[in-house]
Image: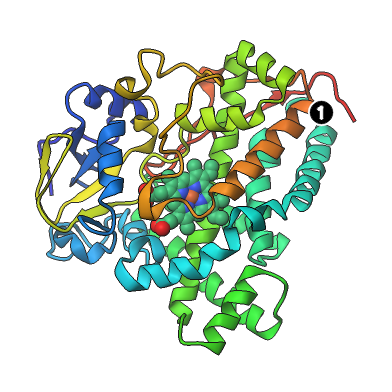
Amino acid sequence: MATNLPSFPARDEMPLDTCIRLREITPVVAVEFPGGVPAYLALTHQAVREILARDNKTFLRDPKHWPALHDGSIPEDWPLRAIVEGDHLATKDGGDYRRLRGLISKAFTPARVQALEPRLQQIVDGLLDGVIAAGDGVDLVPAFTEALPMWVICELFGVPAEERHQMRDWTAALLAHTTPPEEAFATQNALQAYLHELVECRRREPGDDLTSSLVQVRDESDRLTTDELVGVLWLMLVAGHETTVHLLGHAIVALAQNPDQFELANAEGRWADVVEETLRYRHPVMIPGFRFTAEDVTIAGVHIPKGQAVGVVYQASGIDTAEYGESADRFDITRERSGHLSFGHGPRYCIGASLARLEARLALSALYRRLPELTLAIDPDDIPYSPSLFTFGPLSLPVTLGTVKP
Ligand code: HEM
């Protein structure tokens, strides 16, 4: 399959730069994904918002609505197939979708999340002890920005501590568009097998965790099958850490590059504003999987036929000058905020928004309270970034600690 469309990602260009370049031409663009697969990208705030508002009606998530995936146009070994065909609540529509979302979202209400604060603080403090003990040159990605969200989501779902590294490695391999097809499918199979085992373990030995509660729902009602339960775990464990990892990484880089904003945040304890501004300025999500058109539709003036795959590009929409003015690409924690799309909009709004906000605020506030002189020990231009079209963030952040506070 080959097209004359612009490639996404483009050779020798960061995906966000490609989006910004294409956004100057059109708000919604047809591009060629790796493997020669055509799909649309929505690049402006308005286009993304219009699509999200038509979710679950014009835009569906079940890949059965993408004919090219099933009629031989897209090869069986297309590496992104493993992600696109994933069977979980974000790839379901209608009644099944509402039932699964209902089962899980109750656990993440703002009040329930607030009750987790003391435990989250304990985890943050413990990890920072480790960072400080490691000393100058410590890489904050494995030691802190990855470790914290992994620890939190795994603890909530009862994944044993010694298995969390493996979970992180599987996620990174699955989300990278550079992973060869055999490895992508093998990773997906390994993760699925692991989650089936986890369900079995929690059935034999229930604990005080969300997997055990879901196993109980499966066994005591007809509201959840084993495959659906595994799908829920897959999505919650992956979406529940990968995004927060990159949010923390982007925040640390943005604060290092904008010392005036760091001074302000530190002096006034405006860590919640840092979190919100980071989500706008460098969103961790590039594309949250594909949506499929259930009918012909016009978005931001661009016609998209029925049966096409569309990706909303959160990262590009956050720095759209039409929405945020000429300073859109400036990190400014005092910015007026309304109607931003950091956690989505409409029926598919992020289930974990309260948890992510709390976790990130506690992490940043404790990091800079104990290490107020923290500096990057790497030129920001040399920071390696994740090779993924779905999520995007720094892979390594070596730092110099400066003064250490108790
Ligand atoms: C900084 C952290 C996070 C960001 C920026 C983020 C962002 C988002 C966005 C933009 C969506 C909508 C996706 C779409 O348009 O299809 C979404 C959905 C979702 N998020 Fe998050 N998220 C974060 C953290 C979390 C956490 C911690 C969890 C789990 C505890 C979580 C679970 C989910 C789930 C399950 C969905 C799918 C909802 C649905 O399809 O109905 N997210 N997230």
Q: Give the side of residue 280 with respect to residue 136, left or right.
A: left
Q: Is residue 126 above or below residue 217?
A: above
Badge 1, how many Cα within 10 Å: few under 14, some, many 20+?
A: some
In which image quadrant can residue 163 be found? bottom right
Quadrant where the C terminus sits is top right
Question: Which of 35/149 is in front?
Answer: 149
> Whole-percent x and y of residue 369?
79, 27
- Tell me, yes or no, if residue 169 can be seen here: no
Q: Amino acid at mark 1?
A: Arg
Q: Secondary structure at mark 1?
A: helix
Q: Is residue 332 above or below residue 185?
A: above
Q: Residue shown at 73%/26% (left/top)?
A: 137
- Tell me, yes or no, if residue 359 can be seen here: yes
In which image quadrant can residue 45 be found? top left
Report the residue that reaches farthest toward the right. Answer: 406
> Whole-percent x and y of residue 291?
27, 53
Question: Which of 98/287 is in front?
Answer: 98
Label tally: 1
> Whole-percent x and y of residue 384?
51, 30
Residue that carries the numbered disc 1 in the rendered image: 370
Q: Residue shown at 37%/55% (left/top)?
A: 347
Q: Is residue 386 above or below residue 213?
A: above
Any atom of ligand 1 within 8 Å of the CB at mark 1? no
Question: Which of 117/205 is in front?
Answer: 117
Q: Give the side of residue 228 with respect to residue 124, left or right.
A: left
Color scheme of the displayed model: rainbow
> Whole-percent x and y of residue 308?
16, 52
Question: Which of 281/78 is in front?
Answer: 281
